[in-house]
Image (tube, helix red, strand yellow):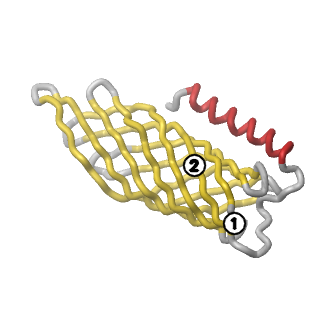
Amino acid sequence: MFNRFSVSSISLALILGASSASVLAADSNYFDFNGEPKVYTGIGYGQYSFQWDDKENDTSFDDDASMLKAYVGTALNEYFSVELAYQNFDEASDIDSNAELDGVSLAARFSAPLNERFALYAKGGWLEWNADIYATIPDVGRIGRELDGGDWFYGAGIAFGVTQNVNMRLEYERYELDDRIDPNMDVASVSVEYVF
């Protein structure tokens, strides 16, 4: 499960952002495209739950850690966007196992605007990832290996416009990676993006 403090912090950021949106940008419409695509870039911070089952070495663990991401995208209209992202997942560990991942993803995002400020969205895409994995095995010692791969992921979230050029997101993503180590990652994050 996610750390309660971290999830509460992300939720508080969304509430404060929503309050700011009503004060700072009551007259602007973030989702007004005027028939032209929009290019945007953003950064995000989140918490992820990492569940790892290494069948080959008979080890497993479940831990929470933080992650950072940066992305750039193009919104072709208010309903469809394509974005490229870099994700850096901090080290997750337990008593005798450690894992650290990062990756680059390409995703499509499908939005459903609720009004001039808010939109719900779903997303899906492909993640190319690298993982450094270490484990301490009784009677063997510390072993480590580097893995890489590519897998599908999906997610959903809510976006709202703070101003006509600044947007915020609260997002959930699910990653089910390579079956050699069978990791599952659930990520909750908050992001700020700028629209050019």
Instruction: Give left or right: position of 151 versus 166.
Output: left
Query: Residue 88, percent across and down?
Result: 43, 46
- Kindly identify the amino acid type of the residue bearing the numbered disc 1: Tyr
Residue 160 position, x and y percent, is 74, 50
In the image, 103 versus 112, the foreground residue is: 103
Disc assigned to residue 43: 2
Q: What element carries label 1?
A: loop
**Which residue is located at x 80 percent, y 53 percent?**
117
Q: Which residue lies furthest to the bottom in this view?
A: 35
Residue at 70% from the left image edge and 70% from the top image edge: 77
Quadrant for the C terminus in the image: bottom right
Of the pair 24 and 9, the residue shown nearer to us: 24
- Circle 1 is placed at which residue position? 79
Percent across and percent down for residue 28 are: 85, 57
Residue 16 vertical placement versus 95 (above, below): below
Going from the N terminus, do you reach mark 2 or mark 1 first? 2
The correct choice, above or below, for 29 with respect to 11 in the image is: below
Q: Residues within 10 Å of mark 2 (few under 14, many from 20)?
A: some
**Residue neighbourhood size for the residue with mark 1, other residues' Cα within 10 Å, grouped as few (<14), some (14–19), many (≥20):** some
**Res 119 → quadrant:** bottom right
Circles 2 and 1, Cβ within 8 Å, touching? The answer is: no
Name the residue furthest left: 139
Residue at the extreme right of the image, as rendered: 27
Q: Which amino acid does label 2 sit on?
A: Ile
